Amino acid sequence: MSKHHASGRRRAGAPVPIARPRDAQRLERRRRATRVRSDLSLTGMSQKVAIAAAASGLVLTIALPTTAASIPAGETAAATGEAVAAAETTVAPRDITVPDAALVDFSRTALQSTFDADAKLTEIMTAAGSAAVPAAARGSLSAPLDDLIMTSPFGYRVSPITGMGGELHSGQDFSSSCGTEVLSAAAGTVTFAGWHPYGGGNRVVIDHGNGLESTYNHLSLSSVKEGQKVDRGEAVAQSGSTGASTGCHLHFEVMVDGQTVDPMGWL
């Protein structure tokens, strides 16, 4: 081996490599690769930091860019109001606590109605007339005395005057002391006030319309006259024992189309 070859010098006949010109596109690709590796490096570092923070109980807040559109200044109030209204509609109902001293009143307004007994009576008589039955007529007439003490009822009986049976007692007797006020059973017009020749003694007859009449018999005196208008419950006479009577009482009759009926079906 020659000295020239041992010293590392090239042989005189070895070709010398020719340097290639730099490629601009290759350089750009290398720079991009360098940036990607840098980004990956930062991402990996952030993940490591997040894992370490979670392990140590820390909370990291990362601000990220948003693509949401911003609200113009002039529409901010309207948008805020809509958001508040939407929030209010979704709020769950809550119990209301009232102090012990507070007055809470849940009373309802009272419903009031006025019953017109005379209008009811007119309705019954207009619809049924002489065919009116106690089930429909009961309560349509008022009591002719403040206290009703029934004695002899309506129907056939033995006459207390003659002692003979088979007599039709045409009304309802009520025991009362002489001079007790007798009251009109309903509003109407007095059609008779005087002496009854067939045993009724002093008698008052009141026409209530539509074929309905009431009579009051054996009176000690009457305080009304024929043609006079009277109201329901108005005093028209005083009880007595005139006519075919054995003592102070009121003989009360109800007539429909001129025929006597049981008064207790109307009281």
Image: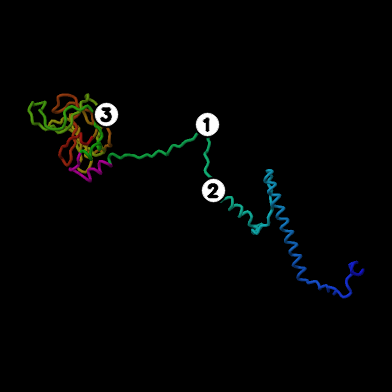
Tell which residue pokes out farthest to the left in this image. Answer: 164
Task: Please give the name of the residue rendered at 73% of the width and 55% of the height, measured from the top-left corner.
Answer: 42
User: What range of the chain is rendered magenta?
Assistant: 119-133
Tell me the quarter of the picture where residue 255 sits: top left
Residue 238 point in image, percent of width and height? 23, 28
Q: Is residue 162 magenta?
A: no
Q: Quadrant of the N terminus?
A: bottom right
* Local SS, label 3: loop
- In this rendered view, identify the residue nearer to me: 116 or 67: 67
Question: Of the residues tagged 1 and 3, which is closer to the observer?
Answer: 1
Task: Please give the name of the residue rendered at 20% of the width and 42% of the height, measured from the top-left corner.
Answer: 132
Residue 227, above or below 250: below
Residue 100 disc label: 1
Q: Residues within 10 Å of mark 2 (few under 14, many from 20)?
A: few
Task: Please give the name of the residue rendered at 15% of the width and 31% of the height, measured from the top-left corner.
Answer: 200
Distance between mark 2 and mark 1 Cα atoms: 30 Å
Question: Of the residues tagged 2 and 1, which is closer to the observer?
Answer: 2
- In this rendered view, identify the residue nearer to me: 152 or 215: 152
Reading the image, the residue beneath label 3 is: 146
Answer with mark 1 or mark 3, whichever residue precedes in sequence: 1
Reading the image, the residue beneath label 2 is: 90
Q: Residues within 10 Å of mark 1 (few under 14, many from 20)?
A: few
Residue 184 point in image, percent of width and height? 25, 34
- In this rendered view, identify the residue nearer to me: 130 or 69: 69
Q: Are marks 2 and 1 in contact (CB under 8 Å)?
A: no
Residue 66, above or below 5: above
Answer with mark 2 or mark 3, whichever residue precedes in sequence: 2
Q: Is residue 71 left or right of residue 118?
A: right
Answer with mark 2 or mark 1, whichever residue precedes in sequence: 2
Q: Amino acid at mark 2?
A: Thr
